[in-house]
Image (spheres, rainbow, N blue to C red):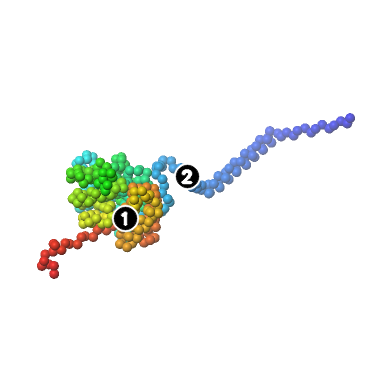
Amino acid sequence: MDEQPAPPAPVTSSPVTSYRTLGLFWATVVICLGAGAAVLQSMGPLPHAAGSAAMPESGSAVTSAPALAAVPVASVVPKAAMAAPDPTLLEPAADYPGRNLPLIGPGNRTPMVVYAAPFDGADKHPRVALVISGAGLDQDQTLHLLNDLPGAVDVAFSPYMPENLDDQFATRARQTNHECLQSVPMEPTGYPLSEEGARSLLTGADNEQNRQNLEWALSRLPACVGATGASDGQMGERFAQTGQGFADLLAEMSKRGLLYVDPRTGAPALATASGTNVRVVDMVIDQSPNADATVTADMIDQRLAALERLATVRGSAIGLAGPPKPILLERIAVWAHALAAHGVTLVPVSATPGPPAPPPSTDAIPPDSAN
């Protein structure tokens, strides 16, 4: 038998060759990773998927309030800063130790002027104002309102909001140029089935009790431009119809240099006859036709458009809405952004004209001066 050749011996690499190959492999991996990182760096951060939340920066404040639709509002945000609380416009509240009440200060300086939100007085376009009441009870929606709506929107705070939030919300309102009002709870239509809490001004209460409750409300946020009877969705209609009780309230507003915004539409006679420190709401934006009707985005849009048309026809108009809710705040933001293009200016309520002075009574004119 022929002798078979022996199989070739296995080829083995030297340790030096093995190490060199392994080093080349890892060098290639490192170069690829470095190139990928450079490409990503040049592209910038990846966009977040719809509905996802960005991680907050270290040390930044986190709020649970949902974000509004991205609507730029810079064109309607006042540029000047609002005045800080002025000690010369405050006096101690005798019935409420540790609290203060607003008053007219030296030089006849009034809260309704000092704490008014800034606006361009040279702007001759029709003016529209909007007051949102019921703020302070829902913390998330109040922050939503203060942070995301134009500063020209007035905010009326509920006197029943948690006491530890008074200063925080008032400070934030000033920082974002929102003119603030203090809501005064009053007896509404339908009382006692509908009521405004233990501190309401009531038709059946004596003058002293109503005075104390009024001062309690005004002492919650004494550095405000004024007050309103709109409180947590109620309008205080029954108390406002009493005559003397409501007249006393208006007299107190005037004595303290405060603006009063009457939430009852239709220019109530008593309010309009009370001087230049009164404004009367023209339209309620989010009031449903009946208790069973749901307030929809379309309804809000239609009311806002009607308010804008009224301002165009008359030169100014005042709207009221609230309490603040997500759909309401979102529609207001969209509407406010379009106002400038429509030739209408969003202004704080203090920048709207007061009611015209009532004509003098002919009974007061002497007979010999009538000719």
Is residue 30 at all visible to an observer of this figure?
A: yes
Dot 1 lies on which element? strand
Q: Quadrant of the C terminus?
A: bottom left
Please report contact status of discs 2 and 1: CB closer than 8 Å, yes or no.
Answer: no
Q: Nearer the viewer, mark 2 or mark 1?
A: 1
Relative to 163, is 253 above or below?
Answer: below
Residue type of the residue flagged with mark 1: Met
Relative to 324, is 306 above or below?
Answer: below
- Density class for disc 2 (Cα within 10 Å; few <14, some 14-19, many ≥20) is few
> Is residue 72 or residue 65 the one in the foreground?
65
How far is disc 2 from disc 1 in space, using C-alphas?
A: 38 Å
Tell me: 335 left or right of 238.
right
Judging by the rendered image, the residue that carries numbered circle 2 is 52
Q: Residue at x 23, y 54 (%)?
A: 271
Give the x, y percent position of residue 292: 36, 48
Name the N-terminal-most of marks 2 and 1. 2
Give the x, y percent position of residue 144: 37, 47
Judging by the rendered image, the residue that carries numbered circle 1 is 283
Q: Residue at x 24, y 58 (%)?
A: 355
Mark drawn on residue 254: none
Q: Residue at x 40, y 42 (%)?
A: 64
Give the x, y percent position of residue 89: 22, 48
- Density class for disc 1 (Cα within 10 Å; few <14, some 14-19, many ≥20) is many
Give the x, y percent position of residue 84: 28, 48
Examine the image and state in which quarter residue 162 appears: top left
